[in-house]
């Protein structure tokens, strides 16, 4: 993948930055460009470059989690910046996206939670709603700005009595996709159980009826068509994570 923001980097850093870019891709699946977009750093001056070099020299999942997770906010955008049409991506073609009946749909909840009762759309819509306009960054080298709205995931986890000292939250999807997050990211103020894109319900191929929107992570950590959510201390992995993509993949 070609780094988008590599050009403005000062020339005296070029060599070090190229080395870094390789390490970053190998260890985390993130490019410097993607890291810049997730964190809102333009990586154009010496300070920013030094900060990245310092961070990358200590790069692994555990250290990344300690450095970033739960505190940094992803950049937000203006309504005029929303990407139209919004791009589709999945491990299959768009015509094969699961066609889910919203009235019959149920969300299962399990694992380290007090209330395992299933949820439906009506119950989710009765919860407090929020949203923000953020950039989705796919590991395949494209990004797009979208307006997702829904239930703050922290509010949902509190409502089901999740053990927030557990390590992971896992997701199972209607298309057999699956993924998982560290608890700090699950509780991050921008992490949303999204029901809407703009003021409309999520379109069929973009995750209807429910997707997780995590603007501090790469696109593959944003599961669509969620069917089940579980809280656990056993590492749940993920569809792409289990094929070698870095599990943390974010800020
Ligand atoms: N259920 C499900 N969720 C998924 C995927 C998928 O194949 N199935 N692909 C992931 C990847 S790699 C990306 S880039 C985004 C694409 O979301 P979009 O179609 O809304 O752009 O969904 C993510 N979540
Ligand atoms: Mo992706």
Image (spheres, grey):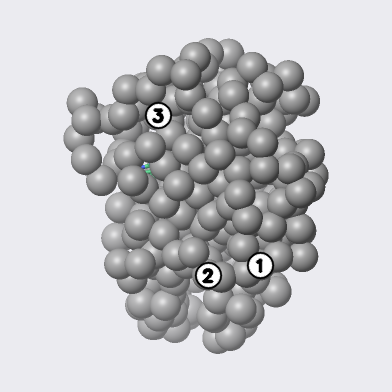
User: Are the residues tagged 3 and 1 within 8 Å (C-beta)?
Assistant: no
- Of labels 2 and 1, earlier in sequence is 1
Q: Position of residue 229 (x, y in %)?
A: 56, 46
Pick the quarter of the image with the C terminus.
bottom right
The reply to whether the C-beta atoms of the residues labelled 2 and 1 are less than 8 Å apart is yes
Under circle 1, the secondary element is loop
Cβ of mark 3 under 8 A from ligand 1: yes
Distance between the Cα atoms at labels 2 and 1?
8 Å
Q: Which residue is mark 2?
A: 235
Residue 234: where, in percent of width, then height?
Answer: 56, 70
Q: Which residue is mark 3?
A: 206
Mark 3 Cα within 10 Å, few/some/many (few <14, many 20+)? Answer: many
Sequence-first disc among 3 and 1? 1
- Image: 71 above or below 29: above
Q: Nearer the viewer, residue 112 or 60?
A: 112
Q: Tell me where residue 166 sits by quadrant.
A: bottom right
Q: Residue at position x 66%, y 67% from top? A: 167
Mark 2 lies on a secondary structure that is loop
Quote the CA–CA distance across marks 2 and 3: 27 Å
| Residue 26 seen by the camera | yes
Residue, x 55% and y 76% (percent of image)? 61
Horizontal and vertical percent position of residue 110 = 61, 49
Q: Are marks 2 and 3 in contact (CB under 8 Å)?
A: no
- Left/right of residue 10 with respect to residue 4 in the rendered view: right
Residue 75 horizontal side relative to residue 249, left or right? right
**What residue is pinned by disc 1?**
167
> Residue at coordinates 41% horizontally, 18% vertically from top-left?
101
Whether the residue carrying mark 1 lies under 8 Å from ligand 1 is answered with: no
Cα distance, mark 3 to mark 1? 28 Å
């Amino acid at each position: 993948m070609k780094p988008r923001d590599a050009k403005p980097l000062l020339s005296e850093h070029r060599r070090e930055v190229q080395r870094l870019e390789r390490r970053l891709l190998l260890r985390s699946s993130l490019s410097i460009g993607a890291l810049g977009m997730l964190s809102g750093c333009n990586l154009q001056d010496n300070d920013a470059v030094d900060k990245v070099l310092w961070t990358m020299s200590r790069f692994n999942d555990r250290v990344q989690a300690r450095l970033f997770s739960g505190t940094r906010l992803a950049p937000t955008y203006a309504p005029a910046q929303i990407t139209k049409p919004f791009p589709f991506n999945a491990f299959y073609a768009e015509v094969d996206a699961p066609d889910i009946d919203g009235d019959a749909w149920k969300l299962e909840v399990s694992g380290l939670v007090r209330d395992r009762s299933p949820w439906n759309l009506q119950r989710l819509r009765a919860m407090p709603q929020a949203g923000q306009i953020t950039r989705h960054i796919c590991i395949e080298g494209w990004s797009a700005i979208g307006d997702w709205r829904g239930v703050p995931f922290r509010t949902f986890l509190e409502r089901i009595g999740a053990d927030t000292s557990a390590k992971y939250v896992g997701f199972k999807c209607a298309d057999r996709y699956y993924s998982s997050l560290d608890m700090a990211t699950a509780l991050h103020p921008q992490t949303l159980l999204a029901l809407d894109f703009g003021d409309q319900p999520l379109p069929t191929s973009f995750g209807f009826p429910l997707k997780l929107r995590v603007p501090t992570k790469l696109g593959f950590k944003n599961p669509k068509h969620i069917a089940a959510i579980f809280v656990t201390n056993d590492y749940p992995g993920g569809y792409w994570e289990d094929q070698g993509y870095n599990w943390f993949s974010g800020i």
